[in-house]
Structure formats: C-alpha cells, structure tokens
Image: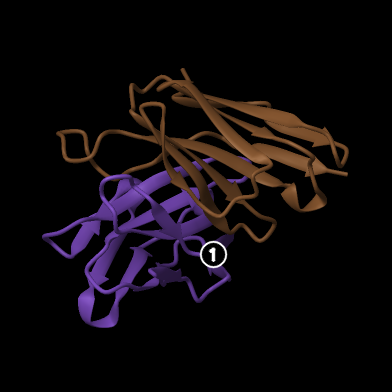
Chain colours: A brown, B purple
C-alpha cells in the first residue's frame, strides 16, 4: 500500500516533447512537493503546494508547470523538454506543521527517472 | 541563505565497523536537522531528525546523530554497520517550519565491504 506513488517510474523521450509525471499520496497530508535530483544526486526543491495552493516556486523554467487538482494529487507537466531536464523527479508530501502530526518529515515517492534524448 | 555541507562524497567501511558521516550547516539560527537515506532506485526515507532538546537523537536502523551547536554540525553515527546499510545518505536543513522547505546536502555514498 504505497503512501506516495509516482507514475511513470521511467520516462524516455525526445527533445522538444511535452511530458507529465503524476503523483498521488494516500497519507492525508496537506502539503506536496516536487524535488529534482540531478546526475550528481543533488536534490533541489522545485515546487510546493499546500491544499492545492502554490506555496513554493523556486527558480524553475516556466516550461515546468505543476497542477494540483486536489490535495492528494500533484502532477508535473514539462513542455519543450531539453537535455538538461534529464533527472530523477521526486514527489513528496508532509503532514501539517504545528499539530500533533507536525514533524517536518517529508515522505518521498520512489522517483521518476526522466531521460531526454 | 542556509546551506548544508557533506564533506565526504564516498565512504567505504567494513561490515561490523563503526561509521560516522559528517554534516555541517550554515544558518543564522538553530535549524531543524534531518538525515535521510536513499537505497538504490528508491525514494528517500527519514532516519532521524532534530528540532530541539536532547542533542543526541536516536533514529531507525540503529543510527544516531549528535547536534553540536558550537561546530554547526549534525554527524550521523552507527556503532556497527551491516551490508544492508550501503546507500546514499543525505543531511538536510529546514528553517521554515511552516512549509518544510528542506535544503539537502550533496549526499555521502556508503559502501560496505565484507
């Protein structure tokens, strides 16, 4: 029973194409994130949504557009893919801070490896 | 801006030996500190975290970490490693508890030899 699930796990595509990665969490968390992990394993936050509202939007090209139809889903759409977009993209979620569940812990999906040729 | 440094890119230890992975942070106040582990092909799993209080924190899988304010460090330790501990380890810093924006270090890859 996967807590944070991403699809697809692997994605190989040509430059210039448009692709989407989907993420769903069944933990009841309010906040979801997209992180990018490059070839050197460096992890950097891209976006954060809290209850469908955009909270964090780091310096990411506007070819990347997140969409949160409800608080359990956060999808990532990428237009006009470039070679440099090749990476592993991680979705994560976290419980509300300050409450009994608030721990600061992120719960990660298994990642989606995107390869742009 | 806050930053996290993991000075060791790759560490190799023998099974049964002790382990210490280093983590230093740069931030004006005491941040929230985390260690995550990433097994090959997997997402990240939380090992332990420090928010306040006792500076020695215990985590899962027999790991512990000690927060040292004077050294701005949060080193991860394990007294005796197992082959299954081979993985990538990430230290992370959080400063805005409202949205859990974590800044990650560059990771330390741990190899275990028999």
Residue B67 as seen in the image, left or right of residue B93? left
Residue B41, picture quadrant: top right
**Location of residue A51 in the rendering, given as x and y in whole percent from the top left corner:** 36, 27
**Within-10-Å neighbours for mark 1: few <14, some 14–19, many 20+:** many
**Location of residue A20 in the rendering, given as x and y in whole percent from the top left corner:** 68, 28
Camera-side residue of A76 and B47: A76
- Residue at 41% from the left image edge and 19% from the top image edge: A26
Asked if residue B27 shows in the view, the reply is: yes
Q: In which quarter of the image is the C terminus of chain A?
A: top right
Residue A77, picture quadrant: top right
Indicate the chain on which mark 1 is placed: B
Camera-side residue of B80 and B74: B74
- Residue at 59% from the left image edge and 48% from the top image edge: A36
Camera-side residue of B22 and A115: A115
Q: Mark 1 points at which residue?
A: B106
Q: Relative to B61, is B21 above or below?
A: below
Q: Relative to A41, is A50 above or below?
A: above
Farthest-out residue, front: A62
Instruction: Tell me the SS state at disc 1.
Output: loop
Q: Relative to B20, is A16 above or below?
A: above
- Residue at 53% from the left image edge and 68% from the top image edge: B13
């Amino acid at each position: 029973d996967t807590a944070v699930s991403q699809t697809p796990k692997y994605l190989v595509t040509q430059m210039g194409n448009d692709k989407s990665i989907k993420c769903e969490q069944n933990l009841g968390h309010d906040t979801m994130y997209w992180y990018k992990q490059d070839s050197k394993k460096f992890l950097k936050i891209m976006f954060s949504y809290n209850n469908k509202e955009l909270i964090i939007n780091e310096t990411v090209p506007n070819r990347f557009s997140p969409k949160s139809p409800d608080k359990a889903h956060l999808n990532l759409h990428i237009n006009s893919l470039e070679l440099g977009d090749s990476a592993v993209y991680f979705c994560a979620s976290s419980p509300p801070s300050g409450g009994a569940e608030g721990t600061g812990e992120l719960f990660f999906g298994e990642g989606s490896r995107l390869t742009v040729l | 801006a806050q930053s996290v440094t993991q000075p060791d890119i790759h560490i190799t230890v023998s099974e049964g030996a002790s382990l210490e992975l280093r983590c230093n942070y740069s931030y004006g106040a005491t941040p929230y500190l985390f260690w995550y582990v990433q097994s090959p092909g997997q997402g990240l799993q939380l090992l332990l975290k420090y928010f306040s209080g006792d500076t020695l924190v215990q985590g899962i899988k027999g790991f512990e970490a000690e927060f040292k304010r004077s050294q701005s460090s949060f080193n991860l330790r394990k007294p005796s490693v197992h082959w299954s501990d081979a993985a990538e380890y990430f230290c992370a810093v959080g400063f805005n508890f409202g949205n859990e924006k974590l800044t990650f270090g560059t990771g330390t890859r741990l190899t275990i030899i028999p």
